[in-house]
Image (cartoon, helix red, strand yellow):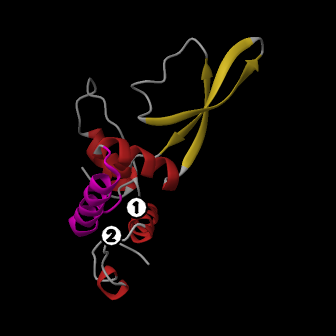
Amino acid sequence: MVGKPKQLMVWLTMQDDDKFFEIKEHHEKRSLNANSYFYVLQNKLAQVLKTGNDELHEQLIKRYADVTLITIPETENIKGIIKYYDIYNTGTIKGIPVIMYKAYKPSHEMTTKEFSRLLDGLISECKEIGIETLPEHELRRLDGYEI
């Protein structure tokens, strides 16, 4: 169900009390054009750098995605909770050993503006090593891309 708060409240009142729901703000999905172009360029860059696509994707995320600092007890395992992360610092809070992580937003969770920044970074890296990219006037026509 997608709707405004009052519409959702009415809809929820008609649901079975045993069900659980997740509510999150709706964002329009990015165009496949911007996504497709991103992965075409990423594949070309991976071939030139002789690296895997997954490894390169993680490097690009860590260079261009938004970062959130997350602090969790040292005994907790962050794997499975956050896909892209780096250890930022360690310490103690109220005597409990903790690890502070830099958590990077995955591309599938990015807004159009955030994804555009990721794509811009990739375009810049491709240009630096001579991989041909679309001219700016064609980039402007990509759905889901903001210059």
Q: Which residue is mark 2?
A: 131
Magenta-tinted stretch:
27-51
Q: Is residue 96 left or right of residue 124?
A: right
Residue beneath the point at 46% across and 65% down = 117
**Between 107 and 25, the one nearer to me in the picture:** 107
Mark closest to the chain's N terminus, 2 or 1: 1
Direction bottom: furthest residue: 137
- In the rendered structure, the answer to whether residue 88 lies left or right of residue 13 reads right
Which amino acid type is marked by label 1?
A: Phe
User: x and y percent of residue 102 in the render?
Assistant: 58, 38
Asked whether disc 2 touches disc 1, contact meaning CB atoms under 8 Å apart, the reply is no
Quadrant that contains the C terminus: bottom left
SS for dot 1: helix
Q: What residue appears at the point 22 percent right and 63 percent down from the top-left corner?
A: 36
Residue assigned mark 1? 115
Up/down of 12 relative to 1, above or below: above
Residue at 37% across, 71% down: 130
